[in-house]
């Protein structure tokens, strides 16, 4: 009986992670530039365009993100999808695929994420355009040329300007002090000013755990606990 319970717990954990992986929706694959939306994107101090060949890991295009002289630039989307991000059950990080055709020739070039949101339930009326820049940044200097799948930027610490010190899940949601709509996001590059860089980004996923996966996780935890009690832990 004990071995059966252990087996059930193991299978529940495996199924949980399988469900979790399936619950990482492809929010952006850069198929539609502005002004068509909702997969629209545009550059802020950078040149952005669709790329049909290099760096394509999902659907038909990647985002070609070119930065010349400039230290802090962005590639912003128009509208966030899927809508579940507006009332998140738990958005902890962003996954993306990154391609470099050549190594960066200077000391630092970091990729980060800013999320823009609307506070529709603010006490004084609706507020728009709040920026939440997250502290975690992905270091690209020193990477060899190639495609890097499922790279990760954590959303656990805002550095402002809106509500620094809090996580995505603290800031976005239905509560009276939360931003109720996550309306857009931006990949930004922070780098050495005079040294250019070109990267290709595709298959961007904001990770939202699947409810079924959460149930399986709870089941697995209960079974493991039962086994532990039977063993006298």
Image (tube, helix red, strand yellow):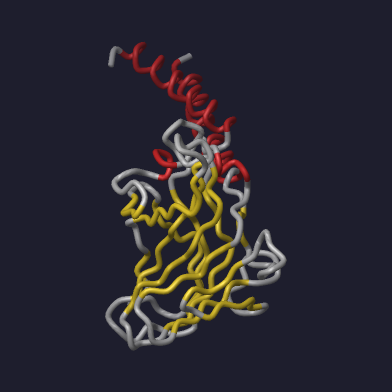
Q: Residue furthest front?
A: 124
**15 sits to left or right of 177:** right
Query: Does 165 sit above or below residue 43?
Result: above
Q: Quadrant of residue 143?
A: bottom left
Q: Quadrant of residue 77?
A: bottom right
Q: Position of residue 208 (x, y in %)?
A: 53, 42
Q: Position of residue 116 (x, y in %)?
A: 48, 54
Taking the spot 34% from the left edge, 55% from the top edge, the residue there is 161
Taking the spot 37% from the left edge, 44% from the top edge, the residue there is 167
Q: Position of residue 169 (x, y in %)?
A: 43, 40
Taking the spot 34% from the left edge, 77% from the top edge, the residue there is 191
Query: Does 197 sit above or below residue 27?
Result: below
Q: Please name whichever residue, 225 or 80, is drawn nearer the observer in this view of the structure.
A: 80
Taking the spot 44% from the left edge, 50% from the top edge, the residue there is 93
The total number of labels drawn is 0
Query: Does 159 sit above or below residue 196?
Result: above
Q: Please name whichever residue, 104 or 147, is drawn nearer the observer in this view of the structure.
A: 104
Q: Position of residue 176 (x, y in %)?
A: 45, 31
Give the quarter of the figure containing the C terminus.
top left
Q: Quadrant of residue 112?
A: bottom left
């Amino acid at each position: 009986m004990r071995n059966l319970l252990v087996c059930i717990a193991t299978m529940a954990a495996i199924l949980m992670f399988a469900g979790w992986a399936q619950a990482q929706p492809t929010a952006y694959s850069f198929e539609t530039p502005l002004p068509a939306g909702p997969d629209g994107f545009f550059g802020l101090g950078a040149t952005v365009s669709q790329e049909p060949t290099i760096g394509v890991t999902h659907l038909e295009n990647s985002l070609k993100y070119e930065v010349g002289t400039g230290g802090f630039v962005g590639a912003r989307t128009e509208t966030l999808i899927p809508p579940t991000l507006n009332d998140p059950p738990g958005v902890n990080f962003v996954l993306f695929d990154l391609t470099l055709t050549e190594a960066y020739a200077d000391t630092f070039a970091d990729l980060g994420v800013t999320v823009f949101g609307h506070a529709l339930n603010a006490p004084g009326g609706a507020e728009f355009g709040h920026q939440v820049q997250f502290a975690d940044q992905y270091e690209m200097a020193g990477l060899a040329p190639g495609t890097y799948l499922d790279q990760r930027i954590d959303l656990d610490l805002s550095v402002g300007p809106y509500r620094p010190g809090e996580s995505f899940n603290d800031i976005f949601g239905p509560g009276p002090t939360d931003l109720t709509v996550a309306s857009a996001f931006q990949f930004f590059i922070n780098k050495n000013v005079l040294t250019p860089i070109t990267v290709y980004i595709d298959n961007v996923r904001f990770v939202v755990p699947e409810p079924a996966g959460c149930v399986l996780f709870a089941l697995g935890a209960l079974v493991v606990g039962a086994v532990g009690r039977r063993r006298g832990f």
